[in-house]
Amino acid sequence: MKVLEEFKTFALRGNMIELAVGFTVGAAFTSIAKSFINDIVMPPLGLLLGRADFKDLFILLKEGRRSSSPAQRSNRRRRLAR
């Protein structure tokens, strides 16, 4: 029961309200920033770069490992078990 008492003390100090407000403000800021970039910054930038479509544009930072399908992995295990 000590845990419940400590949680009650924590919640009544106002930390829970501050946490909820911070979470809400963060979520709202994320939406505003995403909308600003997608609707205001990217269209003129696309026009300047010759109608570039940024949806498929990316820079490869590091070559990834090739993955195989689960069927290929199980076949490989069977061959190794023989």
Image: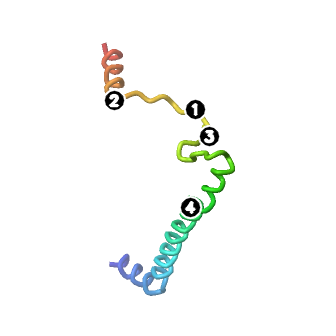
Nearer-N-terminus badge (4/3): 4
Instruction: Give the Cα separation between the discs numbered 2 and 1.
Output: 21 Å
In the picture, measured across the screen, residue 28 lies left or right of residue 78, that is right
In the picture, measured across the screen, residue 37 lies left or right of residue 81, that is right
Q: Which residue is mark 2?
A: 70
Please say if the residues under marks 4 and 2 sit with CB atoms less than 8 Å apart: no
Where, by quadrant of the figure, is residue 41 drawn?
Answer: bottom right
Closest to the camera, between mark 4 and mark 1, is: 4
Closest to the camera, between mark 4 and mark 3, is: 4
Please say if the residues under marks 2 and 1 sit with CB atoms less than 8 Å apart: no
Closest to the camera, between mark 3 and mark 2, is: 3
Please say if the residues under marks 4 and 3 sit with CB atoms less than 8 Å apart: no
Where, by quadrant of the figure, is residue 71 drawn?
Answer: top left
Q: Which residue is mark 3?
A: 59
Q: Quadrant of the C terminus?
A: top left
Instruction: Give the Cα separation between the discs numbered 4 and 2.
Output: 41 Å
Amino acid type, residue under disc 3 in the picture: Ile
Instruction: Give the Cα separation between the discs numbered 3 and 1.
Output: 11 Å
Q: Secondary structure at mark 2?
A: helix
Q: Which residue is mark 1?
A: 63
